Image (cartoon, rainbow, N blue to C red):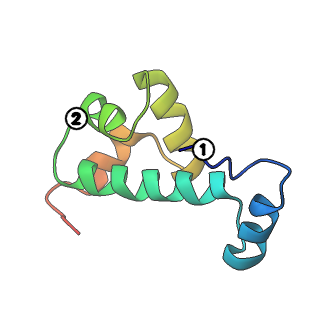
Amino acid sequence: MQALDLEAGDGVGLRFNELAGQSPGQVLLALRMRHACQLLKAGNTVEQVGAQAGYQSVAAFTRAFAKAVGVQPGAYRKQHEGRVG
Protein backbone atom coordinates (compact mmCIF):
# COMPACT_ATOMS: atom_id res chain seq x y z
CA MET A 1 0.00 0.00 0.00
CA GLN A 2 1.34 3.41 -0.95
CA ALA A 3 1.57 6.16 1.68
CA LEU A 4 -0.72 9.14 1.20
CA ASP A 5 1.14 12.42 0.77
CA LEU A 6 -1.26 15.08 2.08
CA GLU A 7 1.04 17.90 0.98
CA ALA A 8 1.24 16.66 -2.62
CA GLY A 9 -0.15 18.60 -5.53
CA ASP A 10 -2.87 16.00 -6.14
CA GLY A 11 -5.59 18.12 -4.52
CA VAL A 12 -5.80 16.14 -1.28
CA GLY A 13 -3.89 18.78 0.68
CA LEU A 14 -5.99 21.54 -0.83
CA ARG A 15 -9.21 19.72 0.01
CA PHE A 16 -7.92 19.10 3.53
CA ASN A 17 -7.25 22.84 3.89
CA GLU A 18 -10.78 23.63 2.73
CA LEU A 19 -12.35 21.23 5.22
CA ALA A 20 -10.08 21.75 8.23
CA GLY A 21 -9.14 25.39 7.70
CA GLN A 22 -5.49 24.43 8.21
CA SER A 23 -2.86 22.48 6.35
CA PRO A 24 -2.19 18.86 7.36
CA GLY A 25 1.15 19.99 8.78
CA GLN A 26 -0.50 22.65 10.94
CA VAL A 27 -3.00 20.11 12.30
CA LEU A 28 -0.21 17.66 13.07
CA LEU A 29 1.81 20.36 14.85
CA ALA A 30 -1.22 21.37 16.94
CA LEU A 31 -1.81 17.74 17.96
CA ARG A 32 1.85 17.25 18.86
CA MET A 33 1.88 20.42 20.96
CA ARG A 34 -1.36 19.52 22.74
CA HIS A 35 0.13 16.13 23.59
CA ALA A 36 3.37 17.80 24.74
CA CYS A 37 1.45 20.18 27.01
CA GLN A 38 -0.38 17.28 28.64
CA LEU A 39 2.88 15.41 29.19
CA LEU A 40 4.58 18.48 30.68
CA LYS A 41 1.63 19.07 33.03
CA ALA A 42 1.93 15.44 34.14
CA GLY A 43 5.52 16.12 35.25
CA ASN A 44 7.50 14.54 32.42
CA THR A 45 10.87 16.08 31.65
CA VAL A 46 11.41 18.21 28.57
CA GLU A 47 13.65 15.46 27.17
CA GLN A 48 10.97 12.81 27.68
CA VAL A 49 8.26 14.97 26.17
CA GLY A 50 10.32 15.89 23.12
CA ALA A 51 10.97 12.23 22.37
CA GLN A 52 7.35 11.23 23.00
CA ALA A 53 6.12 14.05 20.77
CA GLY A 54 8.30 12.70 17.96
CA TYR A 55 11.22 15.12 17.91
CA GLN A 56 14.75 13.93 17.12
CA SER A 57 16.39 16.36 19.54
CA VAL A 58 15.56 18.43 22.59
CA ALA A 59 16.67 21.55 20.74
CA ALA A 60 14.24 20.94 17.87
CA PHE A 61 11.39 20.27 20.28
CA THR A 62 12.21 23.35 22.37
CA ARG A 63 12.25 25.60 19.29
CA ALA A 64 8.98 24.20 17.94
CA PHE A 65 7.25 24.33 21.35
CA ALA A 66 8.33 27.91 22.06
CA LYS A 67 7.21 29.05 18.61
CA ALA A 68 3.82 27.31 18.89
CA VAL A 69 3.00 27.92 22.55
CA GLY A 70 4.88 31.14 23.25
CA VAL A 71 7.01 29.93 26.18
CA GLN A 72 9.87 27.48 26.61
CA PRO A 73 8.71 23.96 27.57
CA GLY A 74 10.55 24.08 30.91
CA ALA A 75 8.79 27.33 31.83
CA TYR A 76 5.46 25.88 30.73
CA ARG A 77 6.07 22.85 32.94
CA LYS A 78 6.84 25.06 35.97
CA GLN A 79 3.76 27.22 35.34
CA HIS A 80 1.51 24.15 35.23
CA GLU A 81 3.06 21.93 37.91
CA GLY A 82 0.52 19.52 39.33
CA ARG A 83 -2.20 20.41 36.81
CA VAL A 84 -3.21 17.50 34.62
CA GLY A 85 -5.77 17.86 31.87
Secondary structure at badge 1 equals helix
The mark found on residue 67 in the picture is: 1
Q: Residue furthest bottom?
A: 19
Look at 24% across and 32% down and name the residue there: 48
Look at 67% across and 74% down and name the residue there: 20
Q: Give percent across and percent down for residue 34.
A: 40, 59
Say what amino acid the circle numbered 1 marks: Lys
| Residue 10, above or below 58 | below
- Left or right: 65, with 14 as reference point: left
Label 1 or label 2, whichever comes before in sequence order: 2
Secondary structure at badge 2 equals loop
Screen quadrant of the C terminus: bottom left
- Left or right: 61, with 40 as reference point: right
- Left or right: 64, with 36 as reference point: right
Say what amino acid the circle numbered 2 marks: Thr
- Left or right: 72, with 4 as reference point: left
Q: Residue furthest front?
A: 1
Q: Which residue is mark 2?
A: 45
> Of 28 and 30, which appears nearest the observer?
28
Look at 65% across and 57% down and name the residue there: 24
Q: CA distance from mark 1 to mark 2?
A: 19 Å
Label 1–label 2 contact, CB within 8 A: no
Q: Give percent across and percent down for residue 13.
A: 76, 59
> Of 30 and 2, which appears nearest the observer?
2
| Residue 62, above or below 28 | above
> Of 64 and 81, which appears nearest the observer?
64
